[in-house]
């Protein structure tokens, strides 16, 4: 032989070797007890029969093992080899085997016993068949690729684990886990380990990588690396880690908090540790709504401008050229059914009761008409939404100061045919009250149809009225502020909590402390109150709501009632009144008209 072999019993042994150090052994009858194998950097091929280790480390560390018909019983001993290939079985007993080389190995036999398997070095081992050993699998270097189920617990500490299989527990201390579809019991991923997932669709294992666990998920600041084509539709939720147990996810990935918005390849996604059925790690492609800010100063008149959280929208339109007063806006509805909300613009005092509706997709004008007598110059408040229950967004207008609290509901179907028709017309307050009426719509009942909310204008008490959808009957009335405040109020509504029931938002008019109050849309109890601008500011605050970040919860939008010392004059808040963003509209400090928001 060109390399030494130590055999304790040679009866029934057929042995040959090649010049490059490769050894071929075949046990013809009896099990062969082996005390030493050394093929140098060559390969020892067991071609038949059963070989039994008589001691630990009987194989030279640089030699490879090919189980091509012959089985190997480690006999509770430990062993280190450069590589392991072949299709025959290994019995570990309570022993263990370590693969330490740099080659790419495919092993299709079965490992059994209670011992351990360790992968070191820079090579890879692919388990093609199911293994039944119940000890630990240590991935300390190189990689292990799984093509079949494994009974073992896996500990990754420097190497890479990948593939598709059902395994025992998974613990990653360092190195990486790059599954296709991995199902395990408890999962623990701690820094500096990394979870690498490739995303193509919402189909786990086929379109996108996923881990499913039957136990607990513990994250200790491990890195999460996401790649792929991300072909998610708007609003689609992708489960990255499916936790089918009852325990919540413990800890976080490095730098990613719960409900954090992350940007991938220029698209915004919502990351959650309590997604899916409540304890899954998920990624959802967001459907953020733009906000509209009215009364933006331009050289040829007041305009409105659209803003988006990802800065992808920069539309600016001057609806009534030559008019430099207030522009009141609503952008809560899609009138032309193209999937993008459209913008309703109305002139404030001095501009006549003109209404224009613009496409949110391209800025083209969809409709232009007078909501009241053309001679009326007190301005118009606007709101939009389906208030009739026919599935088509309607337009609601409220007359400004000097015109009485006249509310008109314009049928949405008639608007799409460019022939505005009144569906309902009523006075929200006493007809003799000339302070005007602000309007809003919101799905307070959670039935998919919006109610109408009105706010008394300047000179009246801060009274909010709520009218039912369809019949437009008064269902509730309350004072949003101290009854003696007469500066007028502004109203809005939005689902701020994600429970599919809108909350009512109010803002004070000029003369009092600029205060925003929040009310439950079902029992009308106050939920919160805050001052969005600096102490002492009394210029009023206009209010709106939009899902600015696409989280499924609308944000509170505020606009300063005048521009003196109030840049940024638009602010975005969460329901808990946390300030999320501020917008500088570019209006100069000398431009005293306040902004309207939607």
Image (cartoon, grey):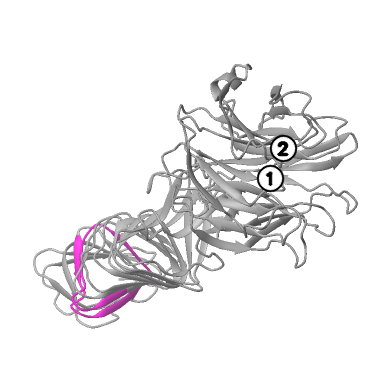
Q: How many marks?
A: 2
Marks 1 and 2 close (CB-CB < 8 Å): yes
> Which residues are drawn in magenta?
70-97
User: Vertical placement of 157 versus 549: above or below?
Assistant: below
Residue 58: x and y in percent read 28, 79
Residue 67, quarter of the rendered image: bottom left
Observer-nearest of 50 and 418: 418
Find disc 1 in the rendering and name its residue: 457
Looking at the rendered structure, the secondary structure element under dot 1 is loop
Question: Percent x, y for residue 237?
Answer: 44, 48
Crowding at mark 1 (Cα within 10 Å: few <14, some 14-19, many 20+): many
- Point out which mark residue 565 bears: none
Q: Nearer the viewer, residue 312 or 266?
A: 312
Q: List x then y, in percent, for residue 244.
A: 30, 59
Whether 84 is among the magenta residues is yes
Q: Nearer the viewer, residue 500 or 433?
A: 433
Residue 320 visible in the picture: yes
Q: Which residue is mark 2?
A: 400
Residue situated in front as seen by the camera: 96 or 200: 200
Q: Is residue 546 visible?
A: no
Position of the N terminus by quadrant: bottom left
């Amino acid at each position: 032989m060109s390399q030494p072999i130590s055999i304790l019993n040679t009866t029934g042994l057929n042995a040959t070797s090649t010049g490059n150090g490769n050894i071929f052994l075949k046990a013809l009858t009896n099990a062969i007890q082996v005390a030493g194998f050394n093929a140098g950097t060559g390969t020892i091929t067991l071609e038949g029969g059963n070989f039994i280790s008589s001691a630990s480390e009987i194989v030279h560390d640089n030699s490879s093992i090919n189980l091509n018909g012959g089985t190997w019983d480690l006999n509770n001993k430990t062993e280190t080899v450069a590589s392991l290939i072949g299709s025959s079985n290994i019995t570990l007993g309570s022993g263990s085997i370590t693969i330490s080389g740099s080659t790419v190995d495919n092993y299709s036999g079965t490992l059994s016993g209670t011992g351990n398997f360790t992968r070191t070095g820079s090579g890879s081992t692919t388990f093609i068949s199911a293994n039944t050993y119940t000890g630990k699998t240590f991935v300390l270097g190189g990689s292990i690729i799984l093509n079949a189920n494994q009974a073992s617990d896996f500990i990754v500490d420097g190497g890479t684990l990948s593939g598709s299989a059902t395994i025992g527990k998974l613990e990653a201390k360092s190195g990486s886990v790059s599954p296709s579809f991995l199902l395990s019991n408890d999962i623990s991923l701690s820094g500096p380990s990394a979870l690498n997932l490739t995303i193509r669709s919402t189909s786990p294992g086929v379109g996108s990588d996923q881990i499913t666990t039957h136990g607990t998920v513990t994250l200790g600041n491990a890195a999460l690396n996401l790649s792929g084509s991300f072909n998610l539709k708007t609003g689609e939720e992708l489960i990255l880690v499916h936790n089918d147990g009852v325990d919540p996810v413990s800890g976080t990935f490095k730098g990613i908090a719960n409900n954090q918005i992350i940007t991938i390849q220029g698209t915004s996604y919502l990351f959650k540790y309590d997604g899916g059925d409540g304890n899954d790690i998920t990624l959802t492609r967001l459907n953020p709504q733009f906000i509209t800010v009215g009364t933006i100063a331009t050289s040829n008149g007041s305009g409105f401008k659209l803003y988006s959280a990802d800065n992808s929208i920069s539309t600016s339109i001057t609806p009534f050229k030559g008019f430099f007063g207030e522009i009141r806006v609503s952008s809560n509805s899609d009138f032309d059914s193209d999937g993008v909300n459209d913008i309703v613009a109305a002139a404030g005092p001095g501009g006549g009761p003109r209404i224009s509706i613009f496409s949110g997709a391209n800025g083209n004008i969809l409709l232009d008409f007078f909501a009241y007598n053309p001679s009326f110059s007190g301005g118009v408040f606007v709101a939009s939404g389906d208030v009739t229950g026919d599935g088509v967004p309607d337009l609601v207008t409220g007359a400004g100061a000097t015109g009485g609290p006249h509310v008109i509901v314009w049928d949405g179907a008639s608007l799409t045919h460019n022939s505005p028709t009144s569906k309902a017309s009523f006075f929200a307050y006493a007809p003799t009250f000339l302070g005007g009426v602000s309007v809003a719509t919101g799905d307070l009942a959670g039935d998919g149809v919006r109610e109408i909310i009105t706010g008394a204008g300047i000179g009246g008490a801060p009274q909010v009225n709520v009218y039912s959808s369809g019949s437009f009957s008064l269902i509730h009335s309350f004072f949003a502020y101290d009854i003696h405040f007469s500066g007028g109020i502004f109203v809005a509504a939005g689902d701020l909590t994600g429970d599919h029931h809108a909350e009512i938002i109010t803002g004070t008019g000029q003369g009092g402390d600029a205060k925003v109050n929040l009310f439950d849309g079902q029992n009308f109890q106050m939920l919160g109150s805050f001052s969005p601008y600096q102490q002492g500011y009394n210029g009023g605050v206009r209010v709106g709501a939009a899902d600015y970040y696409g989280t499924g919860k609308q944000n509170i939008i505020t606009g300063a009632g005048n521009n003196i010392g109030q840049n940024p004059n638009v602010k975005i808040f969460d329901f808990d009144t946390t300030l999320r963003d501020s917008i500088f509209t570019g209006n100069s400090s000398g431009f005293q008209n306040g902004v309207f928001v939607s």
